[in-house]
Image: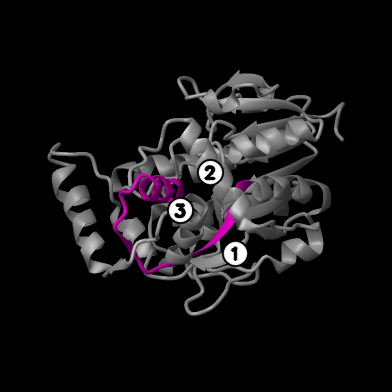
Amino acid sequence: MKQSSRAFITGATGFVGANVARALVHDGWRLRALVRAGSDTRNLDGLDAEIVTGDLTDADLATKLQDCEALFHVAAHYSLRRADRASVVRSNVEGTRNVLAAARAAGVKRTVYTSSVSAIGVRHGGIADETYQAPFDSMIGTYKRSKFLAEQEARAARAAGQDLVIVNPSTPLGAWDRKPTPTGEILVRFLSGRMPAVVETGLNFVNVDDVARGHLLAYEAGHSGERYILGGENLTLRSLLERVGALVGRRAPRLTLPHWLPLGAAFVEERVLAPLGRRSATLAVEGVRMSRDAMYYDTSKAERDLGYRHGPLEEGIASAIEWFAKNGYLSMRR
């Protein structure tokens, strides 16, 4: 328990951040959360936390970090859309550089930086661990490249003497997925009867509660400068939906779409209709391109060094279903 210690968290209004924030409070930390002006703060409802208004790139961020023992830098701009490329780099790369520098200036004891398996990249035909690094030029999209570059900022901070641990979550499922994330949107569409077909792809899925606990384990036991994959099970998308369907009595889609079909639809939406103001893009070309490769990962290092464990994925699935249902995301129909 950390009853006399204060932790500073960024990204607490988001999906992973909201769960990390709750894990910290549950563990006895006093919490201070950085929130952008005008943000949707419903993910902080009922949370015992001090809210400070600011941005990742603020020049006076060090003053907001005063008296904090720990920094959990979870915030990131996740978008695969062409229109968001500049803001993705600004938040993820420049924002990370500024937050870490502010933590050094404020004398923060230890930082846990939330990277992503996206920064590790895809090991084609295999399962990646922390020793693997995909070439930068092979990474699809601005978001993945921004997370790689942000992790380099974290490594540079460590080289400068900052005590810092990197965690790389895979694809979480669970409560507080308010936007929702692309994976959460897949669940919503499937549960609402709006997914007649799937694309052939694979991901590493994990209960977001396990990811949140992994952050605390990284703070307590992580080796400074190391990165740890916080993941769960490697599954095809169809296998995931079969598990979701088993919990709600709904059959997984039988049809498999060839990748060229959603890729063509995404191109028309994002490159033709959206710039003309005809409609907002619901598909991203980069997202469809990513789905061509299975993104599988190994959590052995986190298990060995941190004592990290991932529970049954069904717990995360059930939590996500319950949360989406309670918050009005599902229009269930047979």
Q: Secondary structure at mark 2?
A: helix
Q: Do the CB atoms of the residues marked 2 and 1 lie less than 8 Å apart?
A: no
> From mark 2 to mark 1, how far is it between C-alphas?
16 Å
Left or right: residue 308 versus residue 239 is: right
Q: Which residue in the rendered view is the most extreme toward the bottom?
A: 125
For the residue marked with disc 3, what is the amino acid?
Answer: Gly
Image: magenta residue range: 183-208
Above/below status of 18 relative to 223: above
Q: Which mark is residue 320?
A: 2
Residue in the image at 75% along x and 50% along y: 218
Residue depth check, mark 3 versus mark 1: number of the one nearer the observer: 3
Q: How is the image coloured?
A: one colour
For the residue marked with disc 1, what is the amino acid?
Answer: Glu
Q: Secondary structure at mark 3?
A: loop
Where does residue 169 sit, x and y in percent of width and height? 60, 54
Residue in the image at 23% along x and 39% along y: 280
Q: Which mark is residue 233?
A: 1
Q: What residue did someone put label 3 on?
A: 249
Dot placed on the residue nearer the N-terminal end, 3 or 1: 1
Where does residue 127 sit, x and y in percent of width and height? 57, 74
